[in-house]
Amino acid sequence: MINRNYFFLLLLIFLTACSASQQQLARLPDDAVILAFGDSITYGTGAKKSESYPAILESSVNRKVINAGVPGELSLQGLKRLPKLLDKYHPDLLILCHGGNDILQKEDLAEVESNIRQMIILAENRNIPVILLGVPKPGLFLNDADLYNNIADNTDVTFIPNLIAKILSDASMKSDPVHPNKTGYRKMAFTLADTLQSAGAL
């Protein structure tokens, strides 16, 4: 018979592993700007523009959310694009979801990790907190590529693990093998809103 305290310890470890690696965030003012930065998943490929996760998040949290998603973009291209957007919009929060195209095109994952880390540094140097979303690696059972966990382990980002992986594992929430549909994007938006709420940003 398993010791009761041991059982609850295992349960706590399991729940911690499945939840966001979360920092407390400063409250977002009513006129805050959130920059959603990434590739086609941020853009909303597979659904109408009004059904993208940034559009749904904007209405959910009553804050301006800029959709800065570019379909097909590689992380190195994103790294070059990000500084101008940060300087243009001066966002209060960056939601970062990048690297999926690199993974699909079998780019060097160490380089991808470095590019995403540099994106985070660009935001941190401007005192902009970051929420990081992982992208799954191809496989029968989808999980975030290891590079996202590596980044989350030694940065101050708020990390929501396996959100996209879980969505793409459910046929009812995806439009094709690598993109959510409107239901999947709603799931992304509502999860992000819940994360902002629990982190004290709302």
Image: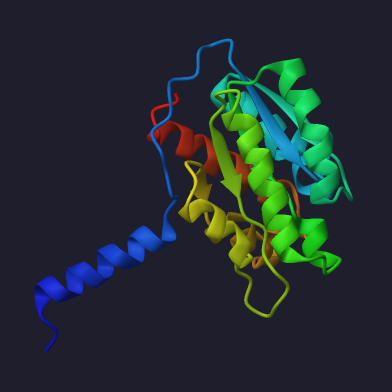
Q: Which residue is at the far top?
A: 31
Image coordinates of residue 123 in percent, x first then y, are 62, 31
Q: Quadrant of residue 52?
A: top right
Residue 183 visible in the picture = no
Image coordinates of residue 147 in percent, x first then y, are 62, 61
Q: Which residue is at the far right?
A: 72
Q: Relative to the observer, which residue lies in front, 53 or 155?
A: 155
Q: Relative to the observer, which residue lies in front, 19 or 123?
A: 123
Image coordinates of residue 86 in percent, x first then y, are 72, 24
Q: Relative to the observer, which residue lies in front, 53 or 92?
A: 92
Residue 49 visible in the picture = yes
Q: Which colour scheme is used?
A: rainbow
- Relative to 194, is 85 above or below? above
Q: In which quarter of the image is residue 79?
A: top right
Identity of the residue drawn at 43% across and 49% down: 21
- Relative to 10, is 152 above or below? above
Q: Name the image quarter holding the N terminus.
A: bottom left
Q: How many labels does the image show?
A: 0
Identity of the residue drawn at 62% across and 37% down: 121
Q: Relative to the observer, which residue lies in front, 149 or 143?
A: 149
Image coordinates of residue 185 in percent, x first then y, are 68, 46
- Relative to 63, is 35 above or below? below
Identity of the residue drawn at 81% across and 41% down: 78
Q: Name the image quarter holding the C terminus.
A: top left
- Relative to 149, is 67 above or below? above
Left or right, 80 with respect to 65, comes to right
Left or right, 97 with respect to 60, comes to right
Identity of the residue drawn at 19% across and 74% down: 7
